[in-house]
Amino acid sequence: MNTGKATKKGVRVFIVGAALSLTAITTWSFKDDLFQISKNLDVFASLYKEVNINYVDDINSSKMIKSGADAMLGGLDPYTEFVPESEIEDYKLHYVSTQYGGIGTTIFSRNNKVYVSDVFEGYPAQKNDIRAGDQIVKINDIELTSKNSDQVSQLLKGAKGATIKMLIKHENAAQPVVKNLIRDEIKQPNVSYYGMVDGNMGYIKLDKFLERSSDEVAAALAAVKKSNPKGIILDLRSNGGGILQEAVKIVNLFVPKDVKVVSQIGKIKEKNFVYNTMSAPAEPNLPLTVLVNSRSASASEIVAGSLQDLDRAVIIGQRSFGKGLVQQSFSLPYNSLVKITVAKYYTSSGRCVQELDYAHRKDDGSVVKVADSLIHEYKTKNGRSVYDGSGVTPDLVIPRDKFANVTQALVGKLLVFDYATKYHDSHPKIADAKTFSLTDSEYDEFVKYLADKNYSYTSTSEKLLNTLKTEATKEKQFNEIQAEYDVLKNKLLTSKKNDVKQHKEEIKQLLENEIVSRYYYEKGRYETHFKYDKELARAIKTMQDQTQLTAILTGQGTYKTIGKPQAAQLAKKADDKKDEAVDEDDEQ
């Protein structure tokens, strides 16, 4: 039982902190009854003290406060969160800047072993011939068998210039080898790729909106403009957002000075802002397309939504996530902080894309979508109709491809990953990433490789058949259909054996991507995927067709209305269920 002086001192510090918090609250113009605030803080402090002193087992005080804070904020929205001192560095990496001291790898765990999943070109790991698929056995003589990926990641990170000793085992090597690396400053750029694609179009892939992201986009734009492109493609797919002001600056690259991009409005007037473009655009005239999907959120939606509202760009892909909330970080005592949703943002036309209504939950605590009856129509600069409350609906919707169950199983079981490692060992060189393609005979070798591998999965047809059996059993009719059921089941099993060949094209696509990454790293992944990218192909085709481009941006015919609620709901049902939350948030 923890009843020592340290615990009592901690209680006194907490009570003093609570009193100071109350003093700060008192000086602020809240409408709430200050007596209720004081009473509840007193109750919370007393509860913490009594449990800490009297509970039968020792208590981790920091963990208890973190759990209490998380529970308190949990009823608000997923983006309002408490960050204790111990998590500050991870927070900064996630939301502010992705610079850290390390060796330039990503890792994963399998069967209590740690492996390299990707290697960053130009960093210590790649320079010391550490490869994707290698097992990391020890770090600074520390065995890793009992460590999870997060713990190993912390061992890999450290001060720039410091030496790190690693014991590495390649798949076909008889013994592991020692590698002595010197940590470097790892900079994960916001712009992960830029260059020229088919049709002499400039392509820029923006992954996040952290510090200097607008500078990176500006530099990428300047670089591709040297090739005299016929149009620009800004790829925001799976970009979860980041810093709001960076989004405004990126919009400013393509639209004139003194144009409203976005406004944020909350209950505190001092936090209400209107963000206008501040300078002359770098490229106001070239055709522009923006690619989005269901994981393009917040700052991505500011860029896509405002460029759509201003009729500056054609938006292509799937409907975006629908996050119209803005967060701001506030410092707390002892190097901790709290990130709070302080406002909603509204794009140029005045619409808010927020889809989920966290303020009006159901009795069971679940969150509901904004009802169609509450969705409003807004007008773009050229008079096109757009709508709030449901993300950004693209001007050109491209249905999302869903991989077959067999493909998902091969990726999930890491068989595509493992075969890429095997392929690299036996092929010192391959063609460049843009032209590399597996031959039919090479794909057949992959099929042979799978012969003794376990990648069991349940096909959609099998799921339906199992449902039939369950329902027929409930209704006591299964005995009557069992013979037909068994015949059908056997036919499905026979058909299932051919799935690897039936879904050859999509499996081949992922296999090529993984293989190319072994030779040309992340850049290679992008370039080998270009030939399969439907959204990219549509963007190129659209910018090559001046008639269609003009029709979309001026709202001719069917392009007059974008994402009308009923149509938006039907489109949403056609998509797979999107993730519950998005990691990155808009911050001031």
Image (cartoon, helix red, strand yellow):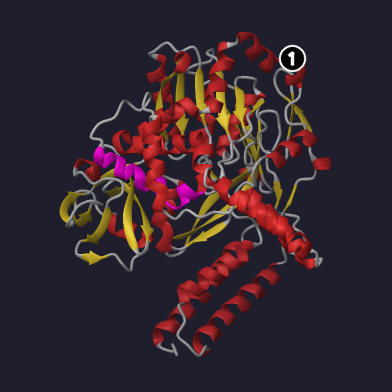
Vertical side of 145 occupied by 344: above or below: above
How far across and down, in percent of the image, does residue 303 sit?
57, 31
Q: Residues within 10 Å of mark 1 (few under 14, many from 20)?
A: few
Is residue 205 visible to us here?
yes
In the image shown, does 517 or 211 lie closer to the viewer?
517
How far across and down, in percent of the image, does residue 211 sit?
43, 39
| Residue at position x 64%, y 46% in the image | 343
Is residue 119 visible to us here?
no
Vertical side of 167 occupied by 294: above or below: above
| Residue at position x 25%, y 39% in the image | 426
In the image shown, does 78 or 27 lie closer to the viewer?
78
Extreme residue toward the right, this view: 373
Q: Is residue 415 magenta?
A: yes
Residue 374: quarter of image: top right
Specify the segment rendered in magenta: 409-426
Q: 231 left or right of 271?
A: left
In the image shown, does 564 or 584 lie closer to the viewer?
564
User: What residue would you read off at disc 1?
Assistant: 556
Query: Mark 1 falls on what kind of element?
Result: loop
Residue 229: quarter of image: top left
